[in-house]
Amino acid sequence: MTEPETTTVEINGFSCRVWKKGSGPKLGFLSGFGGLPKWVPFLDALAREHTVIVPSLPGFPGGERGHTVLDSHLDWMLAMRQLLLGAGLDGADLAGSSVGASLAAEMAAIWPQSVRRLALIAPFGLFDDSDPPTDPWAQRAPDLPGLMCADPAIWEALKAEPEGLNSPEWPIEQTRASEAAARIFWPLGNTKIERRLPLIEAPTLLLWGAQDRILPRSYADKFARTIKGKTEIRVIPGAGHLAELDRPDETAAAILGWTRQ
Amino acid sequence: MKLMWFHLMPYTELPDDFREKNPSVWVDIHSSLFDPRRAHHMYNDFMDELEFAAECGFDAVCVNEHHNNGYGLMPSPNLIASALARRTTDTALCVMGNSLALYNPPTRVAEEFAMIDCISGGRLIAGFPVGTPMDTCFAYGQNPSMLRERYYEAHDLVLKAWTEPETFAWNGRFNQQRYVNIWPRPIQKPHPPIWIPGGGSVETWRWCADMDHVYAYLSYFGYKAGQTTMTGFWNEMKRLGKDPNPYHAGFLQTVGVAETREEAYELYREPAEYFYGRCLHIDARFANPPGYTSEATIRSGVQGMVSRAADASAPPKYADKFQALAREMDGIVDKGYVIIGSPDEVVEQLTEVATSLNVGHLMLLLQFGNMGKDLAKYNTKLFAEKVMPRLKPLFSEWEDKWWPQPMAKPDRAELPSFRPTTMAAE
């Protein structure tokens, strides 16, 4: 595993880290709940066929305190648009997970020409009264890893402070990622995205961890039904909410199969 | 010094196995535990107790705001304060307070507080808490990432609504109102004293200093745990060049007084264990939504952890505070959560509390847990007769600049004596 190239994009005066690795057609990835404090094997798998570009979301690890100036949904949309443009992702394939998947779907809905093919892993944005999601913010700290990943140890390892770093900032950045997600999705995760899904023309792959303990599997059907473009649902066995962390190879293979088309 | 009588209004009939059978007293406490017909009696007992405290000569009666909460039955403390305004005459009414960010628009608070101030002839103390995570973020769905900014903006809006004589437009980040012009306006000028119930954050201390508001530390864990916070507050005041005026601060303390310490232990054991065992049974998953605690405060906590570990008497961090607390009377008394004793012993301990914390506004919980009205009145009366007179002279060298300035007594409305309906029917 080699290190990605790292640059930054300035959004509203805050710096957002952009990772880049691999060669071939560009593929963007927007991270899920908690963000990516470290490079992960899933991104290497994508980089086998793509130039993978990973901009960190405002307030997520690598995204400073960019969320603190985003007060409305429109603020978020414009920040994300600037971020994708700055990262050189306009018109490219776009994938996202969880929180990032919801934002990727918004980009494809509002700026249809900006996304070629779309892959969404368990996106936030809906709330079904008869089948509500788990509240990711009302959790005891030890319970969260098992809600994010089928294998809690994977989430714990991602979130663990690198040995020898000893920075009081590390845990603060992890909490900040949770806060940034709350800033746009509190309290229900419901951004009424269903109103915008009919605007998505990009062919859209919906991936769902078979053991997702945050978002019910039925939400995949709602996304697939409402998106205008061609859709396909794939369930990843053995994976939790963040399928790309639990099953990096299978999740990447599904996305690569989609972007090859 | 000022002695203030504080009621939380706890539901007094939570079952014995409440802790075992229920995850939390707050946020998702089950409705089947609430009997409105019993609550009718509780509310009336509690209001009797508050009125009794006023009759006994306490300087103020205090109420506060909680939501979805089995130990705090006052979603709207303003309703109680309004009733108290009509059944008390000279006692200050301390509403501690209204969680500003929960009101839309926040001028609702400016209006209701102005009403209470007018009805009471200028006896209101206006408390502005941020509100706990349980009340604000979970029960009321406020975004933890914006709560504090909304709170500060609402504070500025309320202050301007009270003091600006002309109709004005409020063009805020979170609130926009084209015509702000509240009727009524408060009696107290420029506005009722503002008190801020806060935790231990440096930002809140600095803000209270800048705004010249009272900082009140409302902890249920007594003076021993409160020492660290109040020392931090006074150090910051000193650094900012402020006088160590004890009336710049308030502190909450639970007290049970009886003829002897042994009697006090027996009398107050059950309500104390009910309060610390059942009322503070709070699910940790609601204690710390991300963004509620500022990064600067987390930073000071992270860095202070090592020194805290060395000091076993320091309060545990907020997230696990509720798990580590004492629930049995010996621990409750040893840790100073509840001060008990004969009048002499209570005077001695509270003198120590007031002077060591340098607090001129002592808020007393004399009803707590499932304590019934008779015992609450006994505690209140004994405190008023035997303890209060000996504490009052403390801090007489300082001026309380943060106390209500009511209308002169001859100018105030005369309250008719209360006539029960049975009399009216005759």
Image (spheres, grey):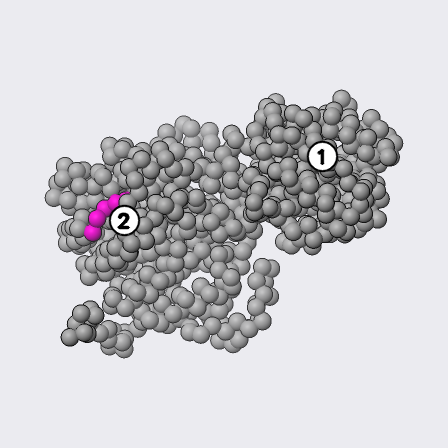
Q: Nearer the viewer, residue A224 or A166?
A: A224
Marks 2/1: CA–CA distance: 55 Å
Q: Quick one: which residue is furthest to the left in this view?
A: B259
Q: Check the residue under mark 1 and report the chain it is in.
A: A
Q: Main secondary structure of the magenta part?
A: loop
SS of the residue under disc 2:
strand
Instruction: Report crowding for label 1: few under 14, some 14 to 19, many 20 or more residues within 10 A (C-alpha).
Output: many
* Residue at 76% across, 22% down: A1
Coordinates of residue B104 in the picture (x, y in percent): 51, 61
Is B262 placed left or right of B356 in the picture?
left
* Residue at 60% across, 46% down: A127
Closer to the camera: disc 2 or disc 1?
1
Residues at marks 2 and 1 touching, judged by CB atoms closer than 8 Å: no
Residue, disc 2: B365
* Residue at 34% across, 45% down: B33
Instruction: Report crowding for label 2: few under 14, some 14 to 19, many 20 or more residues within 10 A (C-alpha).
Output: many
Residue, disc 1: A207
Coordinates of residue A224 in the picture (x, y in percent): 73, 42
Q: Amino acid at mark 1?
A: Leu
Q: Quadrant of residue A49?
A: top right
User: Which segment is the magenta one?
Assistant: B368-373
Q: Is residue A204 magenta?
A: no
* Residue at 52% across, 31% down: A143
